[in-house]
Image (cartoon, rainbow, N blue to C red):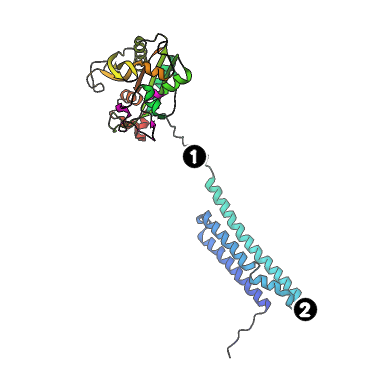
Amino acid sequence: MRDQQPQQTPDEQLDHISQTVRAELKARFDNIEAQGRATLSPSEAEKQLQDLKDLRTKSLGKKSEFANLKKSIGRLPAEGRADFGQRIQQTEGVLVQGFDDEEDYRKRLIETSRSERESIDVTMPGRRPRPGHLHPVTLMRERIEDIFVSLGYAVEDDREIETDFYNFDALNISEGHPARDPQDTFYTTDGFALRSQTSTVQIHAMQRRGAPVRMIAPGRVFRRDTPDPTHNPMFFQVEGLCVDRGITMAHLKGTLAEFVHRLFGPETRTRFRPSYFPFTEPSAEVDYSCFNCGGSGCRICKGSGWIELGGSGMVHPNVLRAANVNPEEFTGFAFGLGIDRTCARIYQLDDIRLLFENDVRFLEQFR
């Protein structure tokens, strides 16, 4: 016959459970003392705290051996029941106190570590926040806007995706014109395209406000250009429009002359060269004397003494009709210039792409 292990008495079971739990608590305390309080991270303390809660449940929970011993009190002989029940309560109190002490100790470690990590040393020198600044294209746009606002012009803006009517038909760009070719224009869906000039804003403004009107329309435009030092498929442009009774080419020349005087200096000269644009008649290209060499010739003006400003002309009667303005009563002039090209010339940039590459080392020069 096999040797049978003698069954433990309730007192012996209680002693065994108490010794086991105390040993595990002591081992955890010794481990934390050996590591040293300074080296115990909050995450490690949190993990040990959870381990203690798990051990408490295992040792004293409803399904533990200790709970089974408490349930067995009623089955003990009457003469020993009271003493054993009292001993159970004393042992449970000691074990619960042991768990509470260990958990409190780790909670204090977590709180101390967190306070030390979040504390502020008021004796340390402060770190200044790094201030931002405006992009050079934005700076140039604001300079241009300030000049024209001082001349009595309003600043208008509108959508960047336009219908064929506003992008072409209303600007007297007929069917079959090269500007309508998909190789020149970014079409989104049938009948819609990214605007290729901010002249579209002028049509909206005249339809909304009627005549007379005096406004500029700065904003982004899009064309299928191959990026190079002087071209980009997305760039910034400003269109100007003045429509009223009795407006002539002389008003256009006087306005642009005043503009370049305020932008580049009173000694700057302008000249007009005949040109062609579908939305103006007559049309002219506008140049101004080089702000760097004064017209004697340098690297910026490529030795000519002149720099191109943009296109201009008297608003075509068909454009006025498309905007519901009577060309028999009103006349007007319009002009357009590239903001980023003007910016590149003023800051003497060899490559216009620098303005769009977002290189912080480059942009910090304009702080």
Q: Quadrant of the N terminus?
A: bottom right
Which residue is drawn at the image coordinates 52% and 42% (left, top)? 121
Which disc, if any, is residue 79? 2
* Relative to 332, 289 lies left or right: left
Rendered image quadrant of residue 274:
top left
Pick whichever, 51 or 265, lies toward us: 265
Callout 2 touching callout 1 (CB < 8 Å): no
In reply to whether residue 287 is colored magenta, the answer given is no
* Relative to 71, 58 lies left or right: left
Pick whichever, 180 or 348, lies toward us: 180
- One can see residue 367 in this view: no
Rendered image quadrant of residue 199:
top left
* Badge 1 element: loop
Q: Residue furthest top?
A: 246
Give the residue type that dot 1 points to.
Met
Which residue is drawn at the image coordinates 44% and 34% (left, top)? 130
Q: Which residues are magenta?
A: 175-200
Give the residue type that dot 2 points to.
Glu
Residue 245 position, x and y percent, is 42, 9
* Badge 2 element: helix
Mark 2 or mark 1, which is nearer to you?
2
Mark 1 surroundings within 10 Å by alpha-carbon count, few (fewer than 14), some (14 through 19), many (20 or more): few
Which residue is drawn at the image coordinates 31% and 29% (left, top)? 352
Q: CA distance from mark 2 to mark 1?
A: 73 Å
Q: From the image, tell me which residue sits under label 1.
A: 124
Image position of 256 with respect to 237: above or below: above
* Number of numbered markers: 2
Residue 166 position, x and y percent, is 40, 25
Residue 112 position, x and y percent, is 57, 51
